[in-house]
Image (spheres, helix red, strand yellow):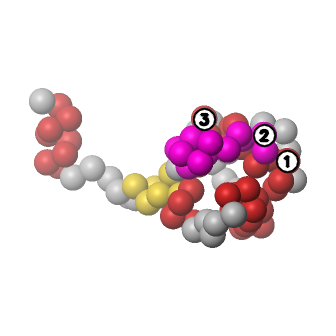
Amino acid sequence: MPTVEWKLKEYLAEKKIPALQVEERAGMGRNTIYRIMRGNGVKLIDRQNLGRIISALSELTGQPVALTDVLELVNDPTPEQLEQQEA
């Protein structure tokens, strides 16, 4: 079953934006962005907070930010991909 994964860490690195700046601009709790980036502790986020993150990133970069900039749909590996991984 496909899952949705965060790409926030890669996005912030590419844009050279500190996580703390995003937290402050989005009005998020301390370490929320860090936990998202590490992939632990934040498995579920509501639409309002996701919107706040996207809005903060847009303000910090001066560019529009799309959901696909920070989220990615990851499909299950195919049997062929699993075989390649085992080899």
Nearest to the observer: residue 28 or residue 20: 20
Q: Is residue 45 left or right of residue 27?
A: left
- Secondary structure of the residue carrying numbered label 1: helix
Q: Are marks 1 and 2 in contact (CB under 8 Å)?
A: yes
Front residue of 36 and 54: 54
Residue extending furthest front?
62
Tell me the quadrant of the picture where the C terminus can be found: top left
Camera-nearest label, 3 or 2: 2
Chain part drawn in magenta: 10-21
What's the mark number on residue 24?
A: 1
Neighbour tally class for label 2: few under 14, some 14-19, many 20 plus, Cα within 10 Å: some
- Residue 71 point in image, percent of width and height: 53, 58
Q: Is residue 9 in view?
A: no
Place residue 73 in its image quadrant: bottom left
Quote the CA–CA distance across marks 3 and 2: 14 Å
Residue 59: give x, y in percent of width and height: 75, 62
The residue tagged 3 is 38
> Of the residues tagged 1 and 3, which is closer to the observer?
1
Badge 3 or badge 2: first in the primary sequence: 2
Queried whether the magenta region covers residue 64, the answer comes back as no
Quarter of the image with the N terminus is bottom left
Give, as a three-letter code, the residue at label 3.
Arg
What is the C-alpha distance between the residues marked 1 and 2?
A: 6 Å
Quick check: can you spot residue 10?
Answer: yes
What residue type is disc 2 on? Leu
* C-alpha distance separating marks 1 and 3: 18 Å
What secondary structure is found at the residue carrying circle 3?
A: helix
Q: Residue at x 85, y 47 (%)?
A: 24
Residue behind mark 2: 20
Locate residue 83, reporting x and y percent: 14, 39
